[in-house]
Image (cartoon, grey):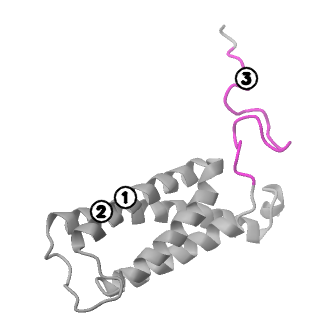
Amino acid sequence: MADKATGGGGEAAWASGGTLFAGVLMMVNGVLGVLHGIAAIAKDDVYARLGDYVYKFNLTSWGWIHLVLGVLVALVGWGILKGADWARGVGVGIASLLVIINFIWLPYQPIWALISVAIGVFVIWALCTDTSDRGGAGTGTGTGTDTGTGTGAQASPHM
């Protein structure tokens, strides 16, 4: 009964909750990416050195890659949490790029790279399956189910 009151089924609620969780994961993963980047830029001996690896970069380059992507991922995660229209599409693109980068990063930190790939896949799934209309929620510009209690919808009685 509660699912009908919210306008969606259990699957819609699951996907919407997944999107919220994806936004949080992107923010946390972005901050961790920034920290990884700073560590790799500051000290070249933080991560294990590899022998011959096809996708070998020096650690300072990897540090800058992680730093820039970490900032982007955190900003997009914030956008997802705020319900920004642009954030879902950009989030899928950034999460896809992050999956590829973490696959290439795999020999440097195999366990964390696999965890990051799994997080990226979940984020892509959550952002692609949530069909709820998050744009305009609470602003009085919704899809007809808005009660008019959003920002700017009521005048103050003391004016």
The percent coordinates of residue 138 (x first, y second) are 69, 39
Q: Which mark is residue 146?
A: none
The percent coordinates of residue 2 (x first, y second) are 78, 61
At label 3, counting other C-alpha atoms closer than 10 Å, the crowd grade (few under 14, some 14-19, many 20 or more) is: few
**Picture quarter with the C terminus:** top right
Report the Cα–Cα distance between label 1 and label 2: 6 Å
Q: Which mark is residue 154?
A: 3
Give whichever of discs 1 and 3 has the lower sequence position: 1
- Examine the rendering and report whether any part of residue 124 can be seen: yes
Query: What kind of element bears circle 3?
Result: loop
Report the Cα–Cα distance between label 1 and label 3: 42 Å
**Picture quarter with the N terminus:** bottom right
Pick whichever, 125 or 72, lies toward us: 72
Picture residue at 23% right of the left edge, 88% below the top: 50
The boundaries of the magenta stretch are: 133-156
Identify the image quadrant of residue 11: bottom right
Query: What kind of element bears circle 2?
Result: helix
Eyeballing the image, is 101 above or below 107? above
Q: Are marks 1 and 2 in contact (CB under 8 Å)?
A: yes
The percent coordinates of residue 9 (x first, y second) are 80, 67
Picture residue at 50% right of the left edge, 57% below the top: 77
What residue is disc 1 on? 68
Magenta stretch secondary structure, dominant: loop
Query: What kind of element bears circle 1?
Result: helix
- Residue type at numbered disc 1: Val
- Residue type at numbered disc 2: Trp
Q: Are marks 2 and 3 in contact (CB under 8 Å)?
A: no
Report the Cα–Cα distance between label 2 and label 3: 48 Å
What residue is disc 2 on? 64
